[in-house]
Image: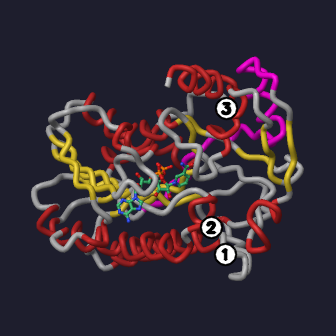
Amino acid sequence: MNKVIVTGGAGFIGSNLVRRLIDDGVDEVLIIDDFSTGKEENLDDSPKINLVKSKLEDINNLNSMFEGYDFCFHLAAGVGVKYIMNNLSESILTNIQGTHLVFEACKENNIPVLITSTSEVYGTSEEKSWDEETKSLIGPTTKLRWSYAVSKMIDEFLALSEYETGNLKPIIVRLFNTIGPNQASEFGMVVPKFIESALKNEDIIIHGDGSQSRSFTWVGDVIEYFIKLVELKNYGEIYNIGQTEEISIKELAKLVIETSESDSDLKFLSHEDVFGDKFEDPSRRTPNIDKIVEATGIKPSYDIKTMIKEIVEYKRQN
Ligand SMILES: NC(=O)c1ccc[n+]([C@@H]2O[C@H](COP(=O)([O-])OP(=O)(O)OC[C@H]3O[C@@H](n4cnc5c(N)ncnc54)[C@H](O)[C@@H]3O)[C@@H](O)[C@H]2O)c1
């Protein structure tokens, strides 16, 4: 990989990926980002970065722009529960139309592409741990939050269909909750929100009763997997990327308070109060990661206590 494209490269995962690619010695990174949720300050000042500030869907010459690149990481998407609920149709269109345009440009230039799907595609599956073949249980369309999951499923179908016909070399990763430096708090991401409240000694707002559990993965581990998957060239495959250690949201809030030595209190609000009646939330979300661990030989390295400690430190300094 010498010349790499990262769509959504100014976002949380994208900016961490770009830094890693430059550290690894790539010659050039083309970033396409409209700054809808990403930020320019997430990016280092490097002559290797070629930044195109635009919505993907507005670029007329994407096919020729991609010419000469070796690999594409397609991360641009409407992301974050709060952002999606506030920008419903725009997020759906970005996730489908934007991805279609990226695939067309990758096909035209024979560029392999890694796409970031999501644990949301499993919906509210009652299976104990979700592997890549687990049946999805998506809620009704009246619960509009599922539009994100379904738009990502369409991306997966599109990628796999193009792969079947020999037109595209896709690698699909389904990311479970990823956390780390540069993750914005304003679009509904739980960890940065909790930590910012704790550092200001403000109430930590929990949606629901806090018994819902999640598993969190360190962004550095996620990127380690990305880099290894590029080397492996297992096109047409889907991989869960996540951690198997579960924590309830209430326990997470307590851990944040303890780690940041905060005087914050917990405050509980119903999902309906926060998002209205178009919302529902899975009670747990834990991946089976056997496939990715077997393929790459890599296990996630950070546990939840280490992650929270690192992010508290990072937030104190930024
Ligand atoms: N962070 C997680 O826990 C998580 C979990 C599952 C899946 N994902 C997926 O990983 C990818 C990266 O997510 P993230 O957490 O870094 O979010 P993010 O919001 O920080 O990054 C998305 C980036 O894409 C850009 N973008 C959005 N729409 C665009 C458009 N139409 N044209 C150009 N740029 C656009 C945004 O400005 C932002 O910089 C996304 O595809 C997301 O769906 C993330």
> 110 or 65: nearer the eye?
65
The disc, 2 or 1, on the residue closer to the chain's N-terminal end is: 2
- Residue span colored magenta: 237-263
Amino acid type assigned to the residue bearing label 2 in the image:
Met
User: Given the image, on which type of amino acid does mark 1 rest?
Assistant: Leu
From the viewer's side, name the closer residue of 238 and 24. 24
Q: Which mark is residue 85?
A: 2
Q: Secondary structure at mark 2?
A: helix
**Residue plotted at (54% across, 47% down):** 241
Of marks 3 and 1, which one's residue comes earlier in the chain? Answer: 1
Residue 195 circle label: 3
Say which mark, if any, is on residue 130: none
Q: Nearer the viewer, mark 2 or mark 1?
A: 2
Display coloring:
secondary structure
Mark 2–mark 3 distance (CA, rounded to whole Å) = 23 Å
Q: Are the residues tagged 2 and 3 within 8 Å (C-beta)?
A: no
Residues at marks 2 and 1, CA–CA distance in whole angstroms: 7 Å
**Residue 180, horizontal then vertical, whole percent:** 53, 34
